[in-house]
Amino acid sequence: MKKELGFKELEKNIETTIYEGILKLGYNSEEALSIYYDLDLLNYLLQKDYLDNSQCLDYLQEFIAYVNPRLYNIKISLEKGRFKFSVPKEGIAYIYSHNQNNTFLKELIQMVKSHNFTLDDVLTIFSHYSNEFTCEEMNNSEFQYVIYFKDSNIDRFKYCFSFDEMGGYYHRLLDYSFNKIMEE
């Protein structure tokens, strides 16, 4: 049961991360995509405590079989100490079609692409989906504000925004990654 839960979390993270990239860069039905993970984030998603990459890589062979019906022959390898997840074009097509109902992310990225937006613009988009969200001003060199929904079923990420003379920028982080940055 714990294994399946960890596999579901990793698959969901791969899907949402790749879908975010598709929204930013556009969808190409002939293109495969790769994303990278560090061991600590994989341990968090998989609910494991691997101390070395080779043990985790062995375990991920089971994950490949688990996601094969959806992500079609995903490849996982080690590259410069990080895990490279390569999703073939058939898996990308699945991710693209399976996430079409994520209108929040579509709307947010459409606005962010211009870099010409304000905090009020961001808050307006969040309020379209729920009035139950948090916006905190941060004392952090990486970002000025963190905004997230109280109901993680709407979206489970923390959106960290910065605004300067060049415009607005964001980072989309899981709780784990957000907390790690805040500890530094």
Image: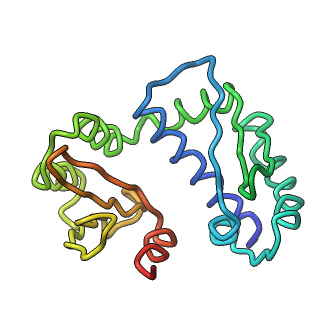
Front in this rendered view, residue 117 or 30: 117
- Tell me what residue is drawn at x 54 percent, y 36 percent: 98
The scheme the figure's colours follow is: rainbow
Front in this rendered view, residue 93 or 44: 44
Q: How many marks?
A: 0
- Tell me what residue is drawn at x 52 percent, y 47 percent: 17
| On screen, residue 146 above or below 73 | below
In the drawing, does residue 67 fall left or right of residue 118?
right
Residue 72 drawn at (x, y percent): 76, 34
Residue 63 drawn at (x, y percent): 79, 54
Location of the C terminus (image quadrant):
bottom left
- Tell me what residue is drawn at x 51 percent, y 47 percent: 16
Location of the N terminus (image quadrant):
bottom right
Residue 34 drawn at (x, y percent): 65, 39
In the drawing, does residue 27 fall left or right of residue 61?
left
| On screen, residue 59 above or below 30 | below
- Tell me what residue is drawn at x 18 percent, y 51 percent: 122
In the drawing, does residue 60 fall left or right of residue 150?
right
Quadrant in the rendering for residue 70 = top right
Residue most toward the bottom?
A: 183
Quadrant in the rendering for residue 120 = bottom left
| On screen, residue 55 above or below 92 | below
Residue 55 drawn at (x, y percent): 88, 67
